[in-house]
Amino acid sequence: MSSSELPPALVLKNGLSFAELFTPAGLQKIDRLFLSRLSQLDVTLHDNLRAWRQGQLSLTALQVSELLIACGPVLDDFIAETFGIEKAAHALRQQTLSHDPIFHFKKFFVQRRARRRLLKKEEFENFAELDAWLTSALTQAGHTAVDRELGVAQYGEQLLLDEKANAEPIEKLVRWCLRAMTTPAGQAAVAGWVSFRLPQGIDYENLVPIVPLNDAVGRVAGPAQHLRRRDGFKLTDLRMNARAVQNEINYCIYCHDHDGDFCSKGFPEKKGEPDKGLKVNPLGVTLTGCPLDEKISEMHSLKKLGYAIGALAMITIDNPMCAATGHRICNDCMKGCIYQKQDPVNIPQTETRILTDVLDLPWGVEIYDLLIRWNPLRPRQYLPKPYNGLKTLVFGMGPAGFTLAHHLLMEGFAVVGADGLKIEPLPAPLLRQAIRDYGQLEEALDTRTIAGFGGVAEYGITNRWDKNFLKLIYLSLARRHHFQVFGGVRFGGTLTVEDAWHVGFDHIAICIGAGLPQALPVPGSLAPGMRQANDFLMALQLTGAAKASSLANLQVRLPAVVIGGGLTGVDTATEIQAYYIVQVEKMLERYEALLKTKSEAAIRAGLNAGALKILDEFLAHGRSVRAERERAKKNNEQPDFLPLLRQWGGVTIAYRKGMNQSPAYTRNHEEIIKAFEEGIYYAEGLEPKQARVDQDGQVEALVAKRLRPNEAGQWRETGEDVTIPARAILVATGARPNVAYEFEHKGHFHKER
């Protein structure tokens, strides 16, 4: 890259330098500058914020919300000015507000007028006639942009300026909305429009749409119309677009102003009396709300007005590690939403969108990094404390470990992180230089370097979640003056507690998670083809087995059965299908490459009968995959591997109870829906009895006891056995806390009773 192509250096305004943002004195300086700006604009607001932060002013929850929301826009403008991105921040704000006419149209035309007339059997024009009229009306009114939804909304707003004079076109537009909601042609015309996306009632027993297969096993699948094609290991969920997120934010009713923000605080049995306890939903889930008490309603209030930086500041008051939460990670906030009988607000989507909106701004990475270290809206930790001389060792660099490391650093501790995984160092320029474009950190997930940082977020979570966020967190910690991290350190092996004390640590934090899988004690459980689900996920993601260049030895066959109804089981099922396609393609390509240097007889000579059977199976399937790629390329479409996967037996999740009693369903049923979209099968009421093997000693079937619920809802054995063909059986029956240290150093820790 020539000097003329180098990205511009960050030049901060207000007399600040980039290096100062990483020193206590520099952060104190920026805090004083912000407070000075706030004082210039509103002395009372400034005085209240300072007094509240210093514990000299007692405020009610509503008063705190009002104070923070009032400060949000000022902080938004201050940060934009400091980083010299006023134009970009203003453009983002205008882009956000540009969707507002759609929500006005939705409220006044779709919901208040059209939906209320749905039950009336009215006779009027068909959709085609009304649509032709609307097209002509839009042209005459000058709303001819490509974005027809916005054009229709703006036209509706224009009509409402004088309802009396425009009574006739208003009525015709309402009739158009009615036909758009009720006729196939109309529904097709507004497909994807958020203005016609209306909340649906919740049936807790049927949150996941299913279609019975009527086979001997009794499996179910998702509706055919919901299937989507997946090819490889790119990000599988691109999240909501900006308009869809603003739709969720406009759907929120901002409960903080009447102490109803249960999404944040938990849903009480009786409002205003938290001592009465929290409600439990029909699935038995306690509605705790956000575990971090994130200020969700306040965040939405700022984002609705277009203040993305201010909204991110609101998030990071309580959740500085928000890059590791949000969409496809946590949804306790949704469960606690005030809407309990209809679709809740999709808060994880809004949180992640706010983060990515800021990251997409120039210097957005640095803005996020700054806000998690300095946030003037926090009552505590609004500035990091000076180094206190104490050193802490944090074992485990997963979500618990890296979050604890951040807070310890904010409290003035020196922190050394240690993890059993090999942790790759970040490139030195990322640590020293300001990052203008978030794209400098982003990598395609199917080819990204496995950095090892993030624990279960690295090896356990699939590519439904953007793991580039891990690099963002890793970067923030690695830049701290009193932080170091070391990989390849096994707790109790490489380093013991005594070793830690000996080298001078004052504290040790054990954040190694629930890493001990539970074995399945049935005959045949050690046969080739049967393995632990988390072992499969770790091998898949840490070895890079899915990459075309990888030589990792990871073999899986179809049909496959995943035993267990938790999220690990659901993730394993989807990844088996995706990996199987990659596996047979690589097998075919490498076999053909070998044929160029050796005879086929020589290649096959060293393999026994069982191995040859698997080889021929993979080669045949690889040729089918290749043919499908060629067909798709010829037709200029994405390949559809699902018919092949199902022809080969597919992947089935087997659970001992009903799907709606499974941990995945009660905790995050969206994951089951997404798995069904990829073509996964599901079988209820199956208790594993035996892994049956073939003549080669390979797993060939899972034999399970059939269970059915009695009148009391308890699942009991029926005396019937079910045989499910399975060349691979993955066990995902839960995990226990990782107490391996006690096995190796018995009696070291004493349990408090």
Image (spheres, grey):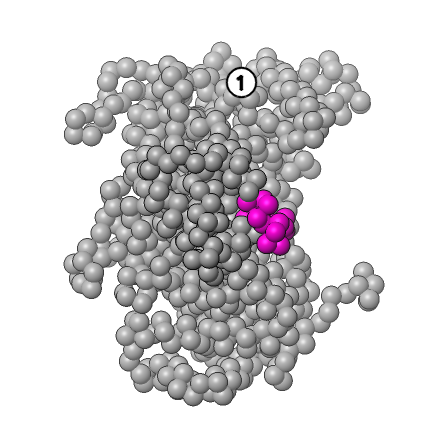
- Magenta segment, prevailing SS (helix, strand or loop): helix
Residue 747 visible (yes or no): no
Residue type (three-letter) at the residue carrying disc 1: Gln
Left or right: where does residue 269 sit relative to residue 401? left
Q: Is 137 in the magenta? A: yes
User: Bounds of the magenta span?
Assistant: 134-149
Residue ID at (67%, 58%): 440
Q: Position of residue 386 (x, y in %)?
A: 47, 80
The residue to which callout 1 is attached is 647
- Neighbourhood count class around disc 1 (C-alpha, 10 Å): few under 14, some 14–19, many 20 upward: few
Rendered position, 730 above or below 12:
above
Residue ID at (59%, 54%): 141
Left or right: where does residue 566 sit relative to residue 128? left
Left or right: where does residue 277 sit relative to residue 438? left
Quadrant of the image containing the N terminus: bottom right
Counting labels gives: 1
Residue ID at (64%, 17%): 620
Q: Quadrant of residue 96?
A: bottom right
In what element is the residue under mark 1? helix
Rendered position, 173 above or below 321:
above
Query: Toward the viewer: 152 or 647?
Result: 152
